[in-house]
Image: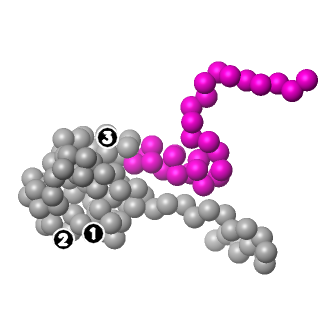
Amino acid sequence: MPAAPAPGEPRAPKEPLWRDLVGDVLRRERLAQERTLKEVADAARISMPYLSEVERGRKEASSEVLAAAAHALGLGLGELLSLAQGELTRRATVSRGRSTAPYNGLCLVAA
């Protein structure tokens, strides 16, 4: 367990939980398709309250449940996990204060 920071020392940014990332991706994809929780839960053959809890990061879903939810949204399990990994990378970069903008090849040098 990491040591607590000394008084006055800034805390390290909190790592996001995987269940939060996956839930965010599922919700974002569902809303982008303008589908209800009920529609997706029925298509995935999981309960609507359970899908809601997964989307909110309250439940740690099994790979079978994640695959069913992903397929109900027209995604493969690999795509869902790849989107969640991209979100993790984006959040980690932002929390460290680094730009998420891609490098465009421009380099300035002070003389």
* Local secondary structure at mark 3: helix
Residue 33: horizontal and vertical position, in percent? 20, 46
Residue 91: horizontal and vertical position, in percent? 52, 52
Give the residue number, with chain letter if any, for mark 1: 53
Relative side of 14 to 30, left or right? right
Badge 3 amino acid: Gly
Badge 1 amino acid: Glu
**Label pair 2/1, CB-CB below 8 angstroms:** yes
How far apart are the two marked residues, 3 and 2, measured between alpha carbons?
A: 24 Å
Residue 15: horizontal and vertical position, in percent? 54, 61
Residue 6: horizontal and vertical position, in percent? 78, 75
The way the protein has been coloured in the rendering is one colour
Residue 78 is labelled as 3
Instruction: Indicate the quadrant containing the C terminus: top left, top right, bottom left or bottom right.
Output: top right
Q: Which residues are magenta?
A: 84-111
Give the residue number, with chain letter if any, for mark 2: 49
Specify whether residue 93 is painted magenta: yes
Residue 58's place in the image compared with 96, above or below, is: below
| In-front residue for pair 85/99 | 99
**Label pair 3/2, CB-CB below 8 angstroms:** no
Residue 104's place in the image compared with 34, above or below, is: above
Instruction: Indicate the quadrant containing the N terminus: top left, top right, bottom left or bottom right.
Output: bottom right
- Does label 3 or label 2 sit earlier along the sequence? 2
| In-front residue for pair 73/1 | 73
